[in-house]
Amino acid sequence: MALKVELRPHERIIVGNCVITNTDQRARLLIDGENVPILRERDILTPETADTPAKLVYLAVQLMYISPDPQTQHGTYFNLVRDIVTAVPSSWPIIENINNHILNGDLYRALKEARKLIAYEEKLRTHLATQTGDVSSAA
């Protein structure tokens, strides 16, 4: 089944191992193929923007998703999640879902679960900031 993607002017998208940048007008693409990784610009993290532990986990899963050999990122990923679970044991259910998707080869769903981990981390940071009265750490 083909995927329809509409790109805003100058928006980028990753298809396979290629970065495609749209021109100055809206564009609609029809992408047909099996098991081709596709990431919109808004879903892409870079090493510079992966500035929290949960975002680093997302980045590791993202690299698995777009890599022809995802196992090269497994060591990094499992080290990161071990550290997170040690620091925040309540994150285990989300990590377990990510792990299951990775082990089943469904890296797109693993990415979606990693987004939930980022949201959970942000919720914890906001809660901690309100408890300590430190509004600057919630931002």
Image (cartoon, rainbow, N blue to C red):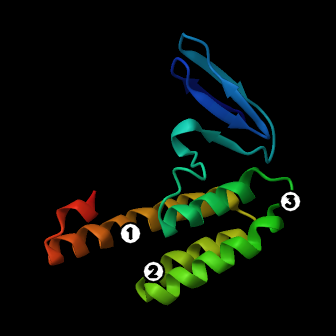
Q: Residues within 10 Å of mark 3 (few under 14, many from 20)?
A: few
Q: Nearer the viewer, residue 79 or 33?
A: 79
- Name the residue located 74 percent from the left edge and 59 percent from the top edge: 64
Type of amino acid at the residue the image marks with label 1: Tyr
Q: Where is mark 3, residue-wise?
A: 69
Type of amino acid at the residue the image marks with label 3: Asp
Furthest-right residue in this view: 69
Furthest-left residue in this view: 133
Q: CA distance from mark 3 to mark 1?
A: 29 Å
Q: Nearer the viewer, residue 77 or 94?
A: 77
Q: Nearer the viewer, residue 70 or 50?
A: 50
The reply, left or right, for residue 19 in relation to residue 96 is right
Q: Which mark is residue 120?
A: 1
Furthest-top residue in this view: 25
Q: Does residue 104 appear in this view?
A: no
Where residue 90 sits, quadrant-wise, is bottom left
Q: Where is mark 2, residue-wise?
A: 91
Type of amino acid at the residue the image marks with label 2: Ser
- Name the residue located 86 percent from the left edge and 53 percent from the top edge: 68
Label located before the other in sequence (1 or 2): 2
Q: Are marks 3 and 1 in contact (CB under 8 Å)?
A: no
- Name the residue located 70 percent from the left edge and 69 percent from the top edge: 102
Residue 61 at what x, y percent from top left? 66, 62
Under circle 3, the secondary element is loop
Under circle 2, the secondary element is helix
Q: Residues within 10 Å of mark 1 (few under 14, many from 20)?
A: some
Q: CA distance from mark 1 to mark 2?
A: 8 Å
Residue 111 at what x, y percent from top left? 59, 58
Where residue 134 sits, quadrant-wise, is bottom left
